[in-house]
Image (cartoon, rainbow, N blue to C red):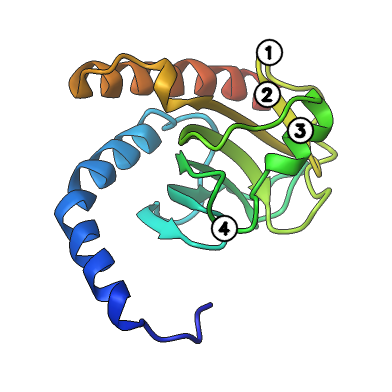
Amino acid sequence: MADEYPEYKDYAALAGFIDTVEPFKKLVNEMFGKLDGVALFYGRVIWASADAEEGTFNAHRFLAEEERFDGWTFLATGIWFPDRGEGFYAEGVEDIGEVPVSLAPKVYIQLANREDDSLTAVEGQPEGDWYRINSDFFTFRDIATFPPEPADAAGAILDWVEVEGAKLKSLLAR
């Protein structure tokens, strides 16, 4: 998709995106801020941006290499659109949970590596609704489960990221 150029209709979609992107960037960047201290990082944060292949709008940062994983391991958080991209973790979640992943937008946290099964040396799993898919760690929650008022929803999302991030931090501290 990166070698394609926009069609005429895509310019209208971009105009709509420009009008709405700032609040999403603010939320996703603040979500990543709630993950500060989960692990030792290497390099800068890649601030909120869209990933069409994944169907996400996310921020991420690489972790400092350690005995259990290499320098291509990263922590990400953002908004996942299961009806976009190439599926992201939907199939893996469905295989583990034996329940279809709804197409509703979701917030998520991901500890992953660009290579499958690269995190097998990280033992255990955070408590709660965390999944291990190809050795990656992944959790999500439907946005519709948060309060409808925008400020209340953002506050609840940030609280959720902080709580789930603490679970991941505890696992990585072992």
Q: Which image quadrant for residue 134?
A: top right
x then y, percent, for residue 112? 66, 45
Residue under label 1: 127
Q: Which image quadrant for residue 18?
A: bottom left
Q: CA distance from mark 4 to mark 1?
A: 28 Å
| Amino acid type for the residue under numbered disc 1 | Glu
x then y, percent, for residue 61? 48, 50
Secondary structure beneath dot 3 equals: helix
Q: Which mark is on residue 94?
A: 3
Name the residue furthest front. 9
Judge by depth and name the residue closer to the eye, 83 or 138: 83
Q: Residues within 10 Å of mark 4 (few under 14, many from 20)?
A: some
| Amino acid type for the residue under numbered disc 2 | Trp
Upstream in the sequence, badge 4 or badge 1?
Answer: 4
Q: CA distance from mark 2 to mark 1?
A: 7 Å
Give the answer, above or below, for where 166 lies relative to 105: above
Residue lying at 36% horizontally and 33% vertically, measured from the top left: 31
Q: CA distance from mark 2 to mark 4?
A: 22 Å
x then y, percent, for residue 144? 41, 22
Secondary structure beneath dot 2 equals: strand
Tag 4 and tag 1, C-beta contact below 8 Å: no
Upstream in the sequence, badge 2 or badge 3?
Answer: 3
Tag 2 and tag 1, C-beta contact below 8 Å: yes
| Amino acid type for the residue under numbered disc 3 | Glu
Q: In this rendering, which labeled residue sits more in front, label 3 or label 1?
A: 3
Q: Viewed as shown, does residue 73 lie left or right of 125? A: left
| Amino acid type for the residue under numbered disc 4 | Gly
Residue under label 2: 130
